[in-house]
């Protein structure tokens, strides 16, 4: 989405300043509402002496009391709370509640929803945070929690010293921890009577989380119990649970040494029939797939509803459907990893669910496994399961209409799009999509333009696409590959026309490519486009713009061109959707253009025209390009995180390219997603300073580094503080813009640096983002003026506001 950039006016500056002064003036005493005899918990420290294995953050989670939250070193929420006279506010609230009740009674009589009035003091009280009063019992409970944690980590001899320091109705607490020596596993013995189970566990022992010489960690033992259960469930033992895994520790022989016995046996619960069956494996006897299942109708009259299905059996699998099958059986079977006669395997159940969901055909996918009637009657160890897969379909076709208003780089615009999707072409889960879009914008062409033609920029276009859930590769039956790698084939076409004050151009694109998953847990995505064709045509130039770039090498980037691209993308993303944990994201792009037609023209001994080969009168571009984007998300908890991001990319024209890297493949910086202290495309390349900054600044190489700390503010509003650094450069020596070329010995002095604050409104389904950035180091200025003074230049008119949807990275 385009980035909206506005300059903050002085009214906002003074309003913000007055609000800050008011808050600070009324909250000079943090103990204002601390009663006599009570103490404000000012700080809590944890010092650890001994083992480096102990996680300080885990110990901090054991604390039953923590000081009031800080924002940029200040207890902002406590300050807001203290800015209100709480005694008077309580009296006001009692009166307000009576009035609100009377008002809402009248609203209810009119059929309206209850609604309380807004009061600034009520809002500030809710925003604020009451002072955390020291509680002796909470400290004792914190110590008890810490001891429990340390013992779980194998430190049974740990000692905790608790200290208090009181000053001016404030108390600071310190927990000094001596871990002592860890208890270590000396011997491991398995006690398993069932020979088949014993063989499984023995073969899998190399994956065990516990081992001789490792700490006797009860948290690890619990993880090992869960690992064994999953291993058993992956080998047919459907009813095996954690109640079948027991640990016995002998600590009597030597100090700090543990002899561990791991026992797998029936549950101690006598009435637990399923757990008593944990040592019998189950085989799949029947597979029933219901392709048009409606859970609401089934709930009303299950027996009659289920009897209304038609059915057919293919390769022993029973398909149940209404009227006629909406998907070809082969499409469903390709996503099913459960086979008749196979042992139950929880991994195959999960893969079946994941692959069926990836077809994008079903609203609800429910896989149920039921014991066959003879499961408890047969005296043999083998038992049977029936698999029932209930699929509730999505609507096959849908339309959507999008309307939007925007303010891109200070330019007002509006637009709309209509989209049509058919999710199931030819009953093969092939998706067809068509999108038409139209937008208008007011865009300045020159810095000194006095009068602007309203909506002087017009853009329209369309996209067509077919997405097939398998690889279309000649002479290769990739059925097994498709079952394991969730592949897709994409065929797309698009046309985009844009009429700007500077120039008018259109871009036609067609592409054919593949996408598939790889790696453990499908963390890796591969994308290959063997065919990606572009036709770029410039129809008209604004004379002023043409004059501006006439003597610059970049004018060749605005020529008509053909691109025949081959590209490969590699994506790694190990983010967990169920756990708050650190994760990484890596994107690698490799692409090249023009090599095949260049070799063909050379092989046919065709002479170049004006120094380059042409097709249909257009020069085809020849270049190589590589991009690398790495992000690391350090997650402290669900609301607090620190994000590191680095991007580097470079493109080299060669061979048939006499006009440099194509314009649509050039790099730019600035805007809401990288250097937020500058307008989009307004900085660089290098130290180049364009007297007319309304023209796009583009380059052949890009480097960006971002650091962003994210934290909660109130309710749905989150905050961020960020640091951005980077720039673009030219690598083609023919580029004659002053200071634009990359130089290894001076590029670090040409890095643009900005910082700022952000606010994000998190509405779950999307995030509305505002970022306020200010330059710290501007390479486009003279050598001695690049670093901005904190006192001279830190003015709100130097801030840039960026608006965006979603996080920047």
Image (cartoon, helix red, strand yellow):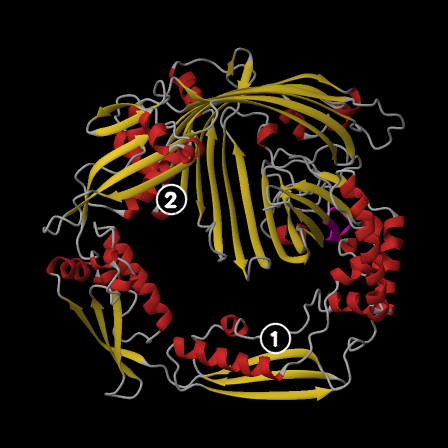
Q: Return the residue at label 2.
A: 522
Question: Can I make out residue 262 in this image?
Answer: yes
Image quarter in which the N terminus is found: top right
Q: How many marks?
A: 2
Residue sitting nearer the eye, 162 or 485? 162
Residue 537 placement, left or right of 796: left
Q: Earlier in the sequence, mark 1 or mark 2?
A: 1
Q: Secondary structure at mark 1?
A: loop
Asked where in the image residue 697 lies, by quadrant, the reply is: top right
Q: In the displayed structure, does residue 750 sit left or right of residue 217?
A: right
Check disc 2 and report its element: helix, strand or loop: helix
Location of mark 1 (residue): 65
Residue appearing at x 55%, y 11% in the figure? 617
When the figure is inspected, residue 98 is found, relative to residue 690, above or below; the finding is below
Q: Is residue 671 above or below residue 194?
A: above
Taking the image as shown, residue 141 lies to the left or right of residue 251, namely: right
At a point 68% along the width and 45% down the height, the residue shown is 769
Q: Which residues are magenta?
A: 772-782
Left or right: 220, with 61 as reference point:
left
Near-viewer residue (193 or 538): 193
Q: Residue 319's spot in the image, x, y percent?
A: 28, 27
Q: Is residue 780 magenta?
A: yes
């Amino acid at each position: 989405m385009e980035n909206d950039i506005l300059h903050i006016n002085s009214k906002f500056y003074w309003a913000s300043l007055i609000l800050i002064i008011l808050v600070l003036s009324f909250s000079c005493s943090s103990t204002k509402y601390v009663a006599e005899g009570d103490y404000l918990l000012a700080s809590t420290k944890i010092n650890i002496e001994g083992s480096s294995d102990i996680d300080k953050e885990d110990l901090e989670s054991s604390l039953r009391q923590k000081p009031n939250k800080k924002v940029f070193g200040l207890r902002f929420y406590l300050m807001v709370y203290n800015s209100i006279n709480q005694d008077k506010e309580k009296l006001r609230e009692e009166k307000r509640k009576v009035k609100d009740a009377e008002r809402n009674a009248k609203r209810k009589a009119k059929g309206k929803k209850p609604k309380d009035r807004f009061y600034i003091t009520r809002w500030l009280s809710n925003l604020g945070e009451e002072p955390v009063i020291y509680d002796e019992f909470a400290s004792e409970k914190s110590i008890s929690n810490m001891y429990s944690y340390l013992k779980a980590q194998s430190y049974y001899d740990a000692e905790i010293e608790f200290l208090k320091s009181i000053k001016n109705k404030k108390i600071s607490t310190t927990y000094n921890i001596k871990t002592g020596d860890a208890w270590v596993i000396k011997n491991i013995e398995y006690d398993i009577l069932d020979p088949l189970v014993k063989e499984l566990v023995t073969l899998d022992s190399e994956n065990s989380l516990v081992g001789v010489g490792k700490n006797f960690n009860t948290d690890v033992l619990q993880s090992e119990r869960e690992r064994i259960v999953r291993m058993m469930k992956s080998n047919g033992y459907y009813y095996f649970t954690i109640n079948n895994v027991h640990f016995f520790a002998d600590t009597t022989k030597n100090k700090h040494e543990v002899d561990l016995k791991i026992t797998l046996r029936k549950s101690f619960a006598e009435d637990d029939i399923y757990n008593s069956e944990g040592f019998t494996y189950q085989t799949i006897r029947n597979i029933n797939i219901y392709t048009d299942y409606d859970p609401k109708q089934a709930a009303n009259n299950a027996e009659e509803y289920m009897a209304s299905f038609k059915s057919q059996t293919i390769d022993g699998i029973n398909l149940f459907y209404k009227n006629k099958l909406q998907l070809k059986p082969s499409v469903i079977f390709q996503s099913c990893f459960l086979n008749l006669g196979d042992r139950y395997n929880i991994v195959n159940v999960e893969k079946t669910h994941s692959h069926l969901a990836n077809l994008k055909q079903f609203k609800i996918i429910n896989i149920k496994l039921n014991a066959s009637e003879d499961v408890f009657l047969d005296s043999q160890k083998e038992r049977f399961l029936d698999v029932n897969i209930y699929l509730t379909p999505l609507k096959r076709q849908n339309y959507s209409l999008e309307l939007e208003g925007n303010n891109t780089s200070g330019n007002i615009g509006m637009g709309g799009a209509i989209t049509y999707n058919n999710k199931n072409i030819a009953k093969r889960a092939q998706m067809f999509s068509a999108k038409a879009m139209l937008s208008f914008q007011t865009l300045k062409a020159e810095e000194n333009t006095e009068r602007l033609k309203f909506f002087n920029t017009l853009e329209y276009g369309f996209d067509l696409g077919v997405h097939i859930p398998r690889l279309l590769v000649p002479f290769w039956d990739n059925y097994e590959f498709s079952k394991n790698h969730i592949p897709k084939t994409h065929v797309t076409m698009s046309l985009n026309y844009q009429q700007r004050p500077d120039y008018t151009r259109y871009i036609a694109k067609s592409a054919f490519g593949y996408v598939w998953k790889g790696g453990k847990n499908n963390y890796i995505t591969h994308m290959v486009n063997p065919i990606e064709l572009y036709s770029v045509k410039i129809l008209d130039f604004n004379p002023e713009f043409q004059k501006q770039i006439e003597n610059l090498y970049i004018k060749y980037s605005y020529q008509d061109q053909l691109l025949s691209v081959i590209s490969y993308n590699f994506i790694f993303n190990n983010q967990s959707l169920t756990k708050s944990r650190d994760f990484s994201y890596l994107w690698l792009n490799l692409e090249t253009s023009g090599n095949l037609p260049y070799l063909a023209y050379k092989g046919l001994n065709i002479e170049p025209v004006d120094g380059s080969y042409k097709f249909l009168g257009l020069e085809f571009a020849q270049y190589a390009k590589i991009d690398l984007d790495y992000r690391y998300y350090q997650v402290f908890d669900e609301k607090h995180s620190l994000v590191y991001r680095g991007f580097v990319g470079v493109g080299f024209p060669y061979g048939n390219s006499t006009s440099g890297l194509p314009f649509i493949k050039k790099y730019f910086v600035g805007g809401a997603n990288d250097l937020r202290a500058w307008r989009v495309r307004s900085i660089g390349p290098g130290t180049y300073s364009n007297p007319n900054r309304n023209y796009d600044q583009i380059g052949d190489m890009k480097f960006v580094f971002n650091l962003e700390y994210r934290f909660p503010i109130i309710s749905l509003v989150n905050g961020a503080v960020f640091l951005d650094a980077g720039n673009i450069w030219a690598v083609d020596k023919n580029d004659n813009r002053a200071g634009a070329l990359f130089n290894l010995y001076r590029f670090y002095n040409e890095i643009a640096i900005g910082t700022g604050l952000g606010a994000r409104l998190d509405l779950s389904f999307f995030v509305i983002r505002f970022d306020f950035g200010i330059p710290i180091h501007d390479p486009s200025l003279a050598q001695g003026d690049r670093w901005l003074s904190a006192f001279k230049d830190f003015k709100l008119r130097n801030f840039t506001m960026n608006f965006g949807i979603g996080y920047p990275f």
